[in-house]
Amino acid sequence: MFKDLRGRIIEKNQKIKETAHWYIVNQAVYDLEKYRASLPSEAVYEICYCLKERAGLLEYKPDQYQWNEFLKDMRSAQMLYQENGLLADSALCALNIMDEGLAEFNIDSEYKPLYLDTIKISLQEVEKILPELMEHPVLNEIYLRLSMYCFSIDDIERSKHYYESFQRLGNFAIDHFAPWLRGRYAVLSLYMFVIGYIETVDKIARKDLSGEITQIQEWFREFHNRNGYFEAIVLGRMFGGDYLPICVEMKSGKMLQGNIVEAGDIESAWLVIPPLQMKIKCNGMLAGKMLGQGFLFSKWENTELRYCNVNTIVPEVRSAIERIIEMIKAELPDSLVTSAELNRLAKNEI
């Protein structure tokens, strides 16, 4: 109830907050059950509301949390909606099950969902009723969330499909979405932009590049085999930056001196997007799993940064970088947000 409030209003209403928390933890389930028992069977919306609220209250008792209890209530609501022809509401329930299954406390140490089978069942259930929702205004939210959740289970092609479907609808204003969904959209757009960037590089690398200078030819052809430092610079420049935050891991026996980086001494490099608390591994891109520590995308937790000032790069290298960017932008898929829009999303941390 109070999680989106900030500043003095919290201090001023601390007693109210404490009372509300006590009620949620100790009394709310009893009142919900009492109210639900009083409802006639035809009060479908109210019954489902009670079931969903009871499932949601489990997060306030983490020591008593049980996935099966959450699933039982959400599945009951989902099925009741579906039995009464309320397909959009049924789909949203299935999406909420997927969301819960991908919450941090339901992920193992290898970043794999503990309840992956249930997530996949919910995915299939949503896909089954999608044809019935083609004219429904909730379709854009469904497409967006399907893309998010498919990405989280490493079903990248399916994620791309739903992201492109979401973009093709074109009838949405992202600022009208709930704050949590806007934030997820910003992160998902970053994922899709980087994947599009990598696939475009691979596409260009297969072309005849004999008309380009040697450094550019080598950059494309050795893209997956380099330490990632210049790859981070290229990607950062595509976001419009001149002063780029980069994390580096040095080779054994090599050390950083101040902010000075010798590119040949670097083992690995990550481009950091501070507003989204994300870092992108720029060496061996697309090798292995997409999400999690050590993979393409992972959480940035205020580790030490080195800043690359593009304006201090020697002119011939800077010119090659700008030519590489020009070649990539000319081939990027139309379904991606522009680098300028992505930069805006990241800065706003929506």
Image (spheres, helix red, strand yellow):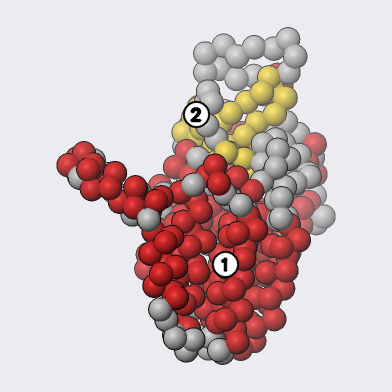
Percent across and percent down for residue 191 are 61, 53
Please state which amino acid type lies under the numbered disc 1. Answer: Asp
Q: Locate the C terminus by quadrant.
A: bottom left
For the residue pair 105 and 140, the one nearer the viewer reads as 105
Residue type at the position of mark 2: Asn
Q: For the N terminus, which image quadrant? A: bottom left
Q: Is residue 318 left or right of residue 253?
A: left
Residue 16 place in picture, x, y as percent = 23, 48
> In the image, residue 84 lies at what x, y percent?
55, 89
Q: Secondary structure at mark 2?
A: loop
Neighbor class of circle 1 (other Cα within 10 Å; few <14, some 14-19, many 20+) is some
Q: Nearer the viewer, mark 1 or mark 2?
A: 1
Residue that lies at the very extreme toward the left in this rendered image: 12
Q: Secondary structure at mark 1?
A: helix
Along the horizontal axis of the image, is 252 left or right of 26?
right
Residues 36 and 233: in front is: 36
Residue 346: give its label.
Answer: none
Q: Which residue is mark 1?
A: 73
- At horizontal 73% and vertical 57% (from top left) the residue drawn is 116
As drawn, 89 above or below 324: below
- Residue at 61 percent of width and 52 percent of height: 66
Nearest to N terminus: mark 1 or mark 2: 1
Q: Quadrant of residue 249?
A: top right
Image: 303 above or below 48: above
Residue at 71% from the left image edge and 55% from the top image edge:
115
- The dot on residue 302 is 2
Using the numbered discs, state the Cα–Cα distance from disc 1 to disc 2 in whole angstroms: 39 Å
182 relative to 325 in the view: left or right:
left
Say which of 189 and 334 sits in front. 189
User: Do we see residue 237 in this rendering?
Assistant: no
The image quadrant of residue 80 is: bottom right
